[in-house]
Amino acid sequence: MKKRRPRAWRGAVVNPLVSSRGIALLMVLWVLMILMVIVLSFSYLTRTEALGTLAFRNSVTKEFMAEAGIQRAVMEVIYRNQNRTLPPVEGQEVWRLDASPHTIQTETGHYTVSVIDESGKVDINKTPELILKNILLNRGLKEEDADTIVDSIQDWRDPDDLHRLHGAESDYYMSLKNPYKARNADFETMEELLLVKGVTAELLYGGGGKGLIDIFTINAKTGKINLNAAPREVLMAIPGMTAELADALITNRSAQPALGVQEILGGTYAAISKYADVMETQVFTVESAGYQGSDKAGYGIRATIMLEANNKIKYLYYKSPVTGIEAGHAGDL
């Protein structure tokens, strides 16, 4: 039998120099890999911080744009108070107080602002129950749900603990997981409606569109609605009002010269005048949205202001930011 020859590697001698070079190469590769990870991480963090800084700057710019809209509206309210009885001059017309939007361009963006006299809204402390219910029905609520909310609103602000057929008083609210009592007095804020049985956040804030907070108010201090300031959804809640009459009233506001509401309403004026009239308050809601460049997403601010003696302005309400303020475009000023 032939003897097997031993394999060559069994007797091979490893060169220490070659071994150390291989280890050094591996270490260099590991160091390079670690450095690459560090560089990439640093680059990513730098880019993230740069984008975050840019987004913050744009957000601040939009906020200042929206605030500029609030201040422009304050100026226009004062200007209107001083010049509304004068003949209109082209380019110097006073702003309408019916939430008509105005878009003002700047070098870096624009803001859209609107003003509405609070008398054009539905005062939840004064307005008849029928109009409150019509508002809710026109928003698509079922009749039983509308009855629950209307009766509960009345129960919330009346001084007793007797609840209406569909309403709720302190006994109901005290049975909730987080109990509280009915106020038994007038509403002090619009957000207080969230405590009333049947009212949801989506119903109050609109869930992307207009909500009750855009239609209801606590500042009108009258049970009647101002026909020259009310938006269409409020006009349509007035008993006897039709879509044609509502559209005619809104169109008439920009006419020169404007007709009287009695001429527009004709034979229906007597019935409608029980719930509506032509008057103004000195309290206004201003909504402003600021935009940077061509961005479609804006920064919204809502404020309620009161015009006092000597054209002094008092803020009754201020919220920033506000979502759901839709930008209308009435043309650049």
Image (cartoon, grey):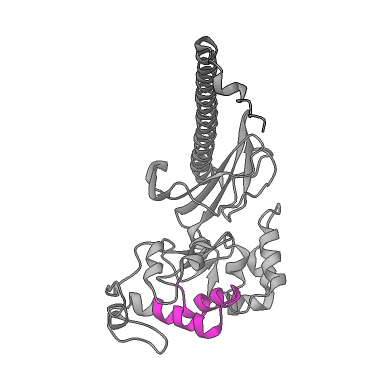
Number of marks in the rendered image: 0
Seen from the viewer's position, the closer of residues 74 and 196 is 196
Which residue, as the protein is rendered here, is positioned at the far bottom?
165
Which residue, as the protein is rendered here, is positioned at the far top?
17
Q: Position of residue 30 (x, y in %)?
A: 51, 23
Residue, x 62% and y 34% (percent of image)?
109
Q: Is residue 177 left or right of residue 110?
A: left
Q: Is residue 228 magenta?
A: no
Seen from the viewer's position, the closer of residues 244 and 182 is 182
Seen from the viewer's position, the closer of residues 113 and 92 is 113
Q: Position of residue 299 (x, y in %)?
A: 53, 43
* Magenta segment main secondary structure: helix
Q: Is residue 322 left or right of residue 269?
A: left
* Position above or below: 171 against 97: below
Quarter occupied by residue 33: top right
Residue, x 27% and y 74% (percent of image)?
181
Quarter occupied by residue 248: bottom right
Quarter occupied by residue 188: bottom left
Q: Which residues are magenta?
A: 127-153
Seen from the viewer's position, the closer of residues 323 and 33 is 33
Q: Position of residue 311 (x, y in %)?
A: 42, 42
Instruction: Indicate the quadrant containing the N terminus: top left, top right, bottom left or bottom right.
Output: top right
Q: Position of residue 257 (x, y in %)?
A: 70, 53
Instruction: Indicate the quadrant containing the C terminus: top left, top right, bottom left or bottom right.
Output: top right
Q: Is residue 140 magenta?
A: yes
